[in-house]
Amino acid sequence: MKRATQMAGAAVLVIAAGAAGAWLTWPPQTVLPRLSEAAGTTHSPTAQPAPAAAPTIALPEAAPPPEPTSTDFGGVTAAASTPPTAAAQDKDPASIDWPAMPIDEVRNRASADDVTAMEELARRLVQGVGITKDQQAGAGWLLRAAQRGSAQSAFNVGVMYERGFVVERDSTKAIEWYRKAVDANLPMAKHNLALLLRDGKGAPRNVKEAVELLRSAARQGMTASMFTLGDIYERGDADVKDPAIALAWFAITAEFEHQTNRGAESQLMKIASQRVQALQRILLPGELERAQQFGQAEFKQIVETLQPPKPSPPPPPPAETGIMPKPALPPMMAVEPDVDSIGWPKAATEQVRVIQQALVDLKLLRDKPDGAVGPMTRNAIRAFERIVGIRETGEPTRDVFVALQEAQKRRDAGAKAEAAKPETAPAESAKAEDAKAESAKIDAAKAADVPTPKDDAEAWPQSSADQIKAVQALLLQLNFSREAPDGVLGPATRTAIREYERLLGLTQTGEPGKSVFDSLKEVRSIAKTKPN
């Protein structure tokens, strides 16, 4: 199997042209999505693959202003960013419908040092949209945009050199341009540069810097970088093979893809999930717990990094000579509450937080509520949904919130009823005699090897078979098993125990011990009452 350069890092040429988005990509080399897909870009069906290496062809100079050609790539160095002219500043590029603009106006703007116009002209020349196709001239305009300080164009020039599009393939120059885009904090450039450094192409091999770049890109939402980190740690490319950390990164990849695609299963999510399952089968409980802790912390860091910045508070009003009274609300104007009648918040973060708090109260979640939907929160929601017999989604929805409230009421009612039971009065002489007689019967039965009465269902049984049967009965009640309790510890019982432990964030042992029994009993208090 080829390394992650081919798996998640197939170099992609993505040229952004204002509102037009990315429009030129390389075909994938494996089943994994293109890097540009991981970055949320779009793809044009007119994109054409280039040969591995194309000769440099000199075109005659056009009338001024000259059209740049592929000869411009010979020994170039990035020029200082030139400020756009007044003609290029008359409109906000983001508000311009670039694809609908006449080609002459695009050309005039590009000649006036409008960087976005340069990129749009490059797109049309490469694809032949409304103009004769000329990939060399298009690449020249792209280079000019990169020289004017466009990070996206610098990245694309790097891909040109790495893949040999129009220019000779040159990994060293590719690294130079990738670094310029990395300086502008472009995650795709971090990813491609990391793969070259990891493999020692165009520069001495530097796995440490590659991992740092991949982690930085991952925190900007690059799922391809998340997956590649898992691949590096699983294979030992980071000089320290660590399957637990690999498992964490694969799990983060799958979860991030799940959220990004709103629950739809992408190809990358499917492959990452398969790697998760493979590692889960071979890792020891301690390693699984370490992977879980690392993954939860890293996922939280990614979510926090992607959070939009909070708006700055409005400036204070200018000082007045006198103190003005605070204006009152107009009549009949009601302040809209932050929560509805059942306490369901309106803000998405608060919705997650109240669900997390309810799961913590029910001892289905151990982490502190933080308002971020991570793997642990989804697992806890799925465990709750299975326990109360509703469809498993793992999503923090209003329906889940309502069901959690009902479960809390059932648990509280049961606890209150238990507390209201009268304490056993001092034994009367008759009852004391009966108790002594019953005890004598049990002792005699044990001595004669006669089966004794069954232990209280709420108590931990004495015999191993009864212990297994008690755990099996609770697993059946909580929808983690469909097998009738038989007291035999088989694969189905171990699988059900592991699934219960996994969803509740416990160390996965698969053993029907007393701690599992006590946990199952505690969780049973929130389950729906089953009909007779």
Image (cartoon, rainbow, N blue to C red):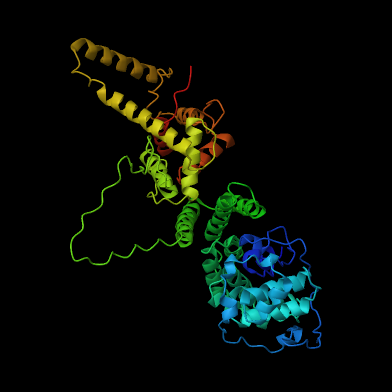
Quadrant placement of the N terminus: bottom right
Inspect this view and state whether residue 21 appears. no
The answer to whether residue 434 is left or right of residue 139 is left
Work out whether residue 135 or residue 206 is closer to the camera in this orientation and state it.
Answer: 135
Q: Report x, y in % for residue 288.
A: 50, 52
- 426 shown above or below 197: above
The answer to whether residue 10 is left or right of residue 479 is right
Inspect this view and state whether residue 325 appears. yes
Q: What residue is shown at x 69% (from left), y 65% (from top)?
A: 99
Res. 30 image quadrant: bottom right
The answer to whether residue 163 is left or right of residue 399 is right
Q: Report x, y in % for residue 141.
A: 70, 79
Q: Report x, y in % for residue 313.
A: 34, 62
Work out whether residue 19 or residue 529 is closer to the camera in this orientation and state it.
Answer: 19
Q: What residue is shown at x 76% (from left), y 80% (from top)?
A: 137
- 340 shown above or below 529: below
Q: Report x, y in % for residue 306.
A: 49, 60
- Looking at the rendered structure, the number of numbered marks drawn on it comes to 0
Res. 222 image quadrant: bottom right
Work out whether residue 154 or residue 148 is closer to the camera in this orientation and state it.
Answer: 148
Q: What residue is shown at x 32% (from left), y 65% (from top)?
A: 315
Work out whether residue 325 or residue 301 is closer to the camera in this orientation and state it.
Answer: 325
Q: Residue furthest top?
A: 430
The answer to whether residue 502 is left or right of residue 429 is right
